[in-house]
Image (cartoon, grey):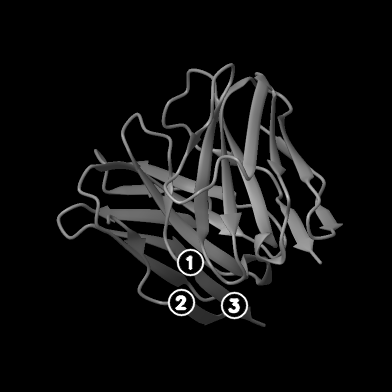
Amino acid sequence: GAVVSQHPSRVICKSGTSVKIECRSLDFQATTMFWYRQFPKQSLMLMATSNEGSKATYEQGVEKDKFLINHASLTLSTLTVTSAHPEDSSFYICSASSFGQINSPLHFGNGTRLTVT
Amino acid sequence: GESVGLHLPTLSVQEGDNSIINCAYSNSASDYFIWYKQESGKGPQFIIDIRSNMDKRQGQRVTVLLNKTVKHLSLQIAATQPGDSAVYFCAETPFGNEKLTFGTGTRLTIIP
């Protein structure tokens, strides 16, 4: 079945540094990828929609200059947390939609646990 | 705003028994519903989905029921096993819109 790979699974960084998280669709082309954020014991909150070849669409309240998204190919989207602060510590999860399959189940990566010290 | 919510945040079930997890949604435009299972430290895993033109769909040991009249969704897991212990989320989206809205989640614990 469709697989979404996310890397790294865990990252610890110092406050003020930037961290890049990769999301890859391994066996299908993903024109659209989604980035979610999940705090402990809470649900997933959509941060942005990443579209191949165009600018990402950010949800209300999400700073686009802080959470840079690049979707340069049909199999890769990256999320860069810039100038990270402790409050950015969270579980970041990406999901991908197969090209042309509207309303097919989204496939999720296994998430990235970001800890900012 | 519109939201998807769950009635019970935690649920404990004896191994082998059946479990039912409920979900209420408020967006009347929702057309596609999905149940996901999330184990600790992992991303959500697809369990079963249902479109609004159906009221019931069955998979292996799981059944999803949809009541559009009261905007209610449920996930039934039959003959629960220890591996079923996880957090379960319902999610919904209007037709053609892949932006999922997730419910608050229910933690299911299977008691051996």
For the residue labelled by badge 1, is the local secondary structure a helix, a strand or a loop? Answer: loop
Percent x, y for residue B78?
49, 65
Query: Can residue B15 be seen here?
Result: no
Task: Identify the residue position indicated by label 2 in the image.
Answer: B9
Task: Identify the residue position indicated by label 3 in the image.
Answer: B109
- The number of discs equals 3
Q: How far apart in space, not on screen, are marks 3 and 2 (Cα)?
A: 11 Å
Nearest to the observer: residue B28 or residue A27: B28
Percent x, y for residue A73?
68, 18
Where, quadrant-wise, is the C terminus of chain A in this rendering? Answer: bottom right
Q: Write down the quadrant of residue A76 in the picture.
A: top right
Nearest to the observer: residue B43 or residue B2: B2
Q: What residue type is labelled 2?
A: Pro
Mark found first going from the N terminus, 3 or 2: 2
For the residue labelled by badge 2, is the local secondary structure a helix, a strand or a loop? Answer: loop
Q: Are marks 3 and 1 in contact (CB under 8 Å)?
A: no
* Residue for point 26% across, 48% down: B55
Binning the other alpha carbons within 10 Å of mark 3 as few (below 14), some (14 to 19) or many (20 upward) gives many
